[in-house]
Amino acid sequence: MAMNLSIKNWAEDERPREKMLQKGAAALADAELLGILIASGTRERSAIELARDILQLAGNNLLELGKLTPADLQKVKGIGEARAITICAALELGRRRQMSEGLERPVIGRSKDALPIVMPLLQDLAHEVMCVLYLNTANKVLRTEVISSGGLTGTVADIKVILRNCLLNNATGLILAHNHPSGDTKASAQDIALTKAMKEAARLMDIRLLDHIIVAGHQHLSLADEGLF
């Protein structure tokens, strides 16, 4: 009769937990951390081996791992829906923690100050998403909002909706940010045209457009820094 992870395999699964308790989470390898989330292995594979399979699926790249959906993770034999959801939930918590740290910044003085907010939100997505940072007169972030979601090659931002939300949030400034799933940070003609139209419409309402940031993986481009609007 086949055993579902014998004592030898159970010991391998338990090691990461003991190591975390003794040395802290930073001492664990990526596969060990994933193994803790997976909790137990299958008859053929230990939790650590399943974790390695998942990392291999992501090209051993944590940025790519963050882009995987529950359906993607279930392509690994031994990873069912519950385990896939657990892993995706943990990754999402990590993203939200990064965003929370970014939102603690009191003032957005330049494009780099907005990156801790927009990078975690946009860098892992496989489709284009536009988000808006609403700012007060001191350039403090009042709210971050995903305003639209598109396909692999583009998204549409409604200027009227953005300006209405500025008024609802008592915002006097805003920053646009969207991602390029292709990995290319270059601003398209559509990106530049939208930014210029947004700046002019906002100006008529005494609202400042501070920047439009393009996120492509771990790279970014600031249209303001490049003088593109």
Image (cartoon, rainbow, N blue to C red):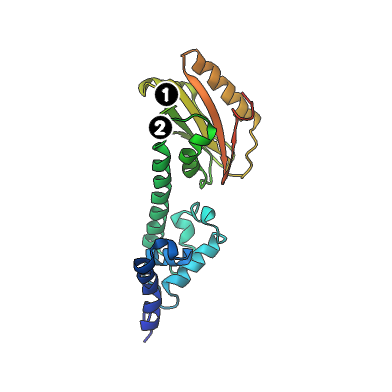
Q: Amino acid at mark 1?
A: Ala
CB atoms at circles 2 and 1 under 8 Å apart? yes
Query: Which residue occupies 38% across, 63% down?
Result: 24
**Mark closest to the chain's N terminus, 2 or 1:** 2
The label number, if any, that marks residue 106 in the structure image: 2
Q: Amino acid at mark 2?
A: Pro
**Disc 2: CA contacts within 10 A as few (<14), some (14-19) or many (>=20):** few
Q: How many marks?
A: 2
- What element does badge 1 sit on? loop
The answer to which of 65 and 29 lies nearer the viewer is: 29
- What element does badge 2 sit on? loop
- Furthest residue toward bottom: 1
Kindly identify which residue carries mark 1.
138
The C terminus, quarter of image? top right
Query: Which residue occupies 44% across, 26% down?
Result: 139
The answer to which of 78 and 110 lies nearer the viewer is: 110
Q: Quadrant of residue 18?
A: bottom left
Alpha carbon separation for disc pair 2 and 1: 9 Å
